[in-house]
Amino acid sequence: MNSRREAVLALLGGIGGAVLTLFAASRPWADGQAVQGTLRAPLEVSGGSLVPVVPALGLAALAGVLAVLATRGWARTVVGAVVALCGLVVAGSALTQRDPDSDELARRAGDALGTATATAAGGGTAWPWLALVGGLLIAAAGLATAARGRAWPAMSSRYERPVADEESSARTQPRANRTADTALDQWRAIDRGHDPTDGPVQSAE
């Protein structure tokens, strides 16, 4: 696998993982009912509400993956390490919250019913597992960037004109113009019947 394809796969994996994380965080990680005596109320707690760090790190990872495009060398390695850390924290948070804390759900059930005490019937959903997958994809992309990113080509390098070429062009252009002007003067002198070998040709405008 060449370095450019390797870079594209890592970046797509990181972006995909961040999108999965953000989507999963918007879905309910706890689903059931708040119960207080005869009172019942639906109870849904999104992942972002239950674990605010998950969507925050999903956004940070997405920004980091995009920043890889603008960095190179050691800076790219550092960005990759940060992205990998974000992914690992997301995965760990999702794993620990696959079965939400009963006390936290009871507190939220009380808030939903407007009472001091309540219980929550129901439990976790499958959405934390999707966040776990997203976190692992982010971590893999970050680790690949940290380990191999310095060898990847800069995404903008193909559009940059080397400075040496610009300087060479600047030196060559006036010389080419002078040569063209001299040849033109000689042709004009021949048309006027002047032999260019007799001496310098005077330009006639």
Image: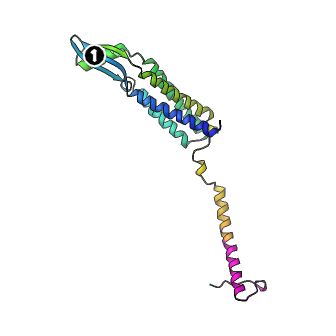
Eyeballing the image, is 132 above or below 204?
above
Across and down, in percent, residue 200 comes to 74, 83
Q: Is residue 57 visible?
A: no
- Where residue 155 appears, as percent x and y from the top left, is 57, 44
The residue nearer to you, when weighing 150 against 188, is 188
Q: Label 1, on which residue?
A: 34
Q: Quadrant of the N terminus?
A: top right
The range drawn in magenta is 177-204
Q: Nearer the viewer, residue 64 or 185?
A: 185
Residue at the left extreme?
38
Rendered residue at 71%/77% (across/down): 183
Side of 46 relative to 13 (left or right)? left
Does residue 46 belong to the magenta stretch?
A: no
* Residue drawn 61% across the image and 40% down it: 4
Q: Residues within 10 Å of mark 1 (few under 14, many from 20)?
A: many
Q: Is residue 101 left or right of residue 134?
A: left
Tell me which colouring the rendered structure shows.
Answer: rainbow
Is 161 situated above or below 30?
Answer: below
Name the spot of residue 126 as percent of width and height, x first.
42, 20
